[in-house]
Amino acid sequence: MSKADAKAQKRQKFEAVFSVLLDELVAHLASKNMPQVALDWYRRNLEYNVPGGKLNRGLSVVDTVEILKGRSLTDDEYFKAAVLGWCVELLQAFFLVSDDMMDSSITRRDQPCYYRLEGVNLIAVNDSFMLEMAIYYLIKKHFRPEPYYINLVELFMEMTYETEIGQLIDLLTAPENHVDLNRFSLERHQLIVIHKTAYYSFYLPVAVAMYMCGIQPASAAAGPDPYELAQSILIPLGEYFQVQDDFLDYAGTPEQIGKIGTDIVDNKCSWCVNTALARATPAQRAVLDENYGRKDAACEARIKATYEEIGIRALYEEYEEAAHKRIMGLIETIPVTSKAPAGQAVLRREVFKTFLDKIYKRSK
């Protein structure tokens, strides 16, 4: 089987679990004596917003459970890992539906943003809440008897709050209709990225897998807490991923990244503009101030030309190599010979190397 075929098969298996969960969620709403129009609306909300992306976050949960256990999963283990993976995807869907409204976005995943569908409009606010609450229904239904049930609930709540904090900082830094580069800085960019992306996209999938595999938080007397150790690696990894994403938005071709980059015209607090601001001459700074965030192709071209003058491509290569070296150093702090009590797993370097290998030098 080719690598592409194996990847497609893996996705299909994961998507089959969503079909089961979709029916469960609609049936739960039906148990509230909701009319058919509400059931149909909820089903469309779930089908339109949840399964259409790359599914990297959800699939990472399954992959991490398998790595931690060091073997293939039983059918029951796979299903439970996939449920948690889909809970992460539901959280992503909740964020995207609401974020698109806040940003007045037009398209998402090559189709109209959900709120722009005929008849939806601001009903999407409530629909985003229902996507979020589906997480807690599924966790309760499938994990209530487990000793780590409350850990899962608290973790999803904490990651949601972290992301909302990041969204707040982002909205205040780069509002849609007001360009002020004095609000931008590499420090502000890092703060936004850590809270808005790194926690829920990188730490959350690994942490839920760790709980499912029986990895216990350590007391102060028992050495490093494995969850704190995981977080210390995954947050920088998530930061690196977003910097890479920002660079590809500028430097990647539509054929590579599957879209046309829009960070410049959308006034995004991107790594590229912040790096340029930190190194710009007064004349270059004037060009950035006059052209950034304008819905104008000529303005965008001036910004890109200024990036080239400043040497953003070479600066990114320096950043990437330094980030890779730093993260590899953090991974190597994970003990290799640790043993866990029977029935539990131990934190493995392979979890983090797998994430890093997928990201390093990526071009899409």
Image (cartoon, rainbow, N blue to C red):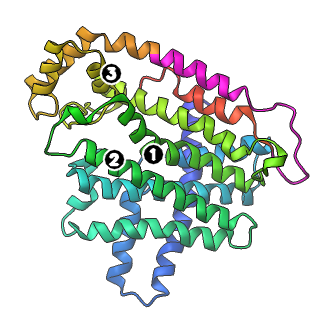
Which residue occupies 41% across, 70% down? 130
Q: What stretch is highlighted in magenta?
A: 319-345
Q: Are the residues flagged by discs 1 and 3 in contact, CB closer than 8 Å?
A: no
Q: Is mark 3 on a helix, strand or loop?
A: helix
* Quadrant of the image occupied by residue 295: top left
Residue 195 on image: x %, y %: 45, 45
Q: Is residue 109 visible to us here?
A: no
Residue at horizontal 25%, vertical 36%? 183
How many angstroms separate mark 2 from mark 3 (CA)?
A: 19 Å
Element on which disc 1 rests: helix
289 relative to 249 in the view: left or right? left
Question: Are circles 1 and 2 on residues that touch, CB within 8 Å?
Answer: yes
Depth check: 228 or 57 in front? 228
Q: In this view, does 154 lie above or below 180?
A: below
User: First in sequence: mark 1 or mark 3?
Assistant: 1
Magenta span has 329?
yes
The residue that disc 2 covers is: 169
What amino acid does circle 3 point to? Answer: Thr
Q: Which of 331 and 105 is in front in this view?
A: 331
Task: Tell me which label, 1 or 2, sits earlier in the chain.
Answer: 2
User: Taking 269 as reference, is 33 above or below it?
Assistant: below
Specify the label residue 195 is tagged with: 1
Residue 22 belongs to the span the image colors magenta: no
Sooner in the amino-acid sequence: mark 2 or mark 3? 2
Residue type beneath disc 2 = Ile
Quadrant into which the N terminus falls = top right
The structure residue drawn at horizontal position 27% and vertical position 11%, both measured from the top left corner, is 310
How packed mark 1 is, by other alpha carbons closer than 10 Å (few <14, some 14-19, many 20 or more), is many
Q: Which mark is residue 275?
A: 3
Check disc 2: other Cα within 10 Å, few if <14, some if 14-19, many if 20+.
some
